[in-house]
Amino acid sequence: MKPAGKPLGPIPPGWGCVDGVLAVDGVPVTDLVARAGDTPLFVYATSLLDARVAQLRAAMPARLALHYAVKANPYSPLVAHMAGLVDGFDIASGGELAILRGVGIDPRRVSFAGPGKRDRELEAAIAAGVTLNCESEGEADRALAIGQRLGVTPRLAIRVNPDFDLKGSGMKMGGGAKPFGIDAVRVPALARRLVAAGVDWRGFHIFAGSQSLDSAAVIETQSQTVALALRLAAEAGVPLPHCNLGGGMGIPYFPGDTPVDLAAIGAALGERLDALGPDAADTQFCVELGRYLVGEAGVYLCRVVDRKESHGEVYLVTDGGLHHQLAASGNFGTVVRRNYPVAIATRFAAEVEEEASIVGCLCTPLDRLADKAGFPRAEPGDLVAVFCAGAYGASASPSAFLGQGPALEMLV
C-alpha cells in the first residue's frame, strides 16, 4: 500500500502539466528555471493574475473599485502588470511608494496606511498627492503641519479602528485595543477638525481583518463596515467621498481549506450598496486586496540537492527554504504547523511512492517546507514546487539569514 503521509494543502487551479512536468501556460517549469539560470526561483503567472481580477470584476458590484495591497508582493514587474488591472494601490511605506513611482503609477491612485509613518514618508506622500490614511490624531497633526510647510493641500482620510473584527480572520486588524487606526468613538471629532482645516478630505479606511475563508463572516463584516462609515460621517457632519472597506478574503493554504464563495460575497455587497440612501449616492467604495489577488498566481521552485535517510525517515534537502518561504515553513504566524500545497515539479504527474520531508539548506530544524507527506520518489536534481507563493513570500522572508541571499523572481 502506498504511503499517504501527512496531507498537503490544495494545489490552486490553473497550473498545468507538460510531459509530466509542472507547467505555466504550457511552458514546463524546467524551461523557466533554465531561462532564469538558477534556483530558487519565484514564478508569477500573468494569466492567473488576469483571471483572478476578471473573476472579481464579474462577481462584485460595478460601483466597487479594486485596489491592490502592494505589501502582498512588491515585485516591480508584477506591480506594473497590476496597474492595468486594478483601480488603485494601497501602500504601507515610503519604500513601496518609490516602487510604484518607479514603474510610472500615478500617485493619485495610491493610498498610504500603516502606523509609524516617518515625517519624510509623510512629506513624500503629501508632495506626490497620495491619500494618507491617518492612524492617529498625532499623525494627522504632523500631516497638516507638513502640508502647510510645503504649501500643498494634503489628501487625508482617517483609518478607523472598528469596534468589531472579522470572524475567522487569520489576522485581526480591528476590534479592541489595536495599534492600527483611530478608535471609532474618536473619529467624528477628528473628521470635523480635518475638514475645517481645509484638507482634501478622502473619507475612511476601515480594515477589520484578513485571510478569512468564512464567506458569511466576510459578508457580515462588509455590511458592518458600510454601516459604520455612514454613521461616523453622519455623526461628524462631513461628507463621505470615499470608503475603503479593507480586504478579508483569504485563499486556501492547508488541508481542508476551501475557497470563499465569491459570488455570494459579491451579491451581498451589491445588495448592501444598492440599498444606500442619497447621502451615499456619490461615495466611492473600494476593497483592498493583496494575497487574494496574487497569492495563488505564484509558485516557488527549488532544487533537491541531496536525498538522505535518518532513522528510517526520508529527507529531500533543497537549495531553498524558510529564508524565501517563511510562511510555508510554518514560521509566519502559524500556531500549529500544517503543510502548504507542495509537489515534485519534475514528477508532477507521477504517483505517490513514499513519505518524505522536504527541508531547506539552513542550519535550523525550523527550515522545513513539507513535513512527512506523500510524494513520488525524488532524487537530486528534481525540482520542488511550493504553491500559493505569490503573496508574502520573497519580500516577507529573511533572505539574508545565514548569508543565503534572495531568490530569483520572474513574471511570465
Image: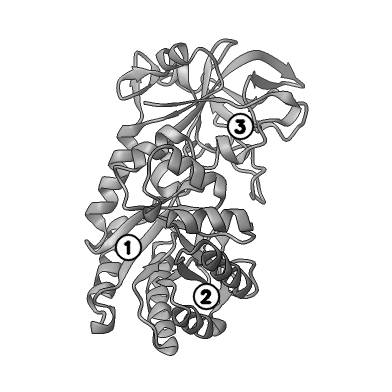
Residue at image coords 64%, 57%: 118
**Residue bearing the label numbered 3:** 324
**Residue 178, x across and y down, in percent:** 63, 69
Residue at image coords 59%, 34%: 325
Q: What residue type is labelled 1?
A: Ile
Answer with mark 1 or mark 3, whichever residue precedes in sequence: 1
Relative to 14, does residue 189 appear above or below in the rendering?
below
What's the distance in space between the residues labelled 1 and 2, CA to CA?
20 Å
Are the residues flagged by discs 1 and 2 in contact, CB closer than 8 Å? no
135 left or right of 82? right
Q: Can residue 295 be seen in this view?
A: no
Q: Nearer the viewer, mark 1 or mark 3?
A: 3
**Residue 39, x across and y down, in percent:** 55, 18
Q: What residue type is labelled 3?
A: His
**Residue bearing the label numbered 2:** 162
185 left or right of 223? right
Quadrant in which residue 61 is drawn: bottom left
**Residue bearing the label numbered 1:** 265
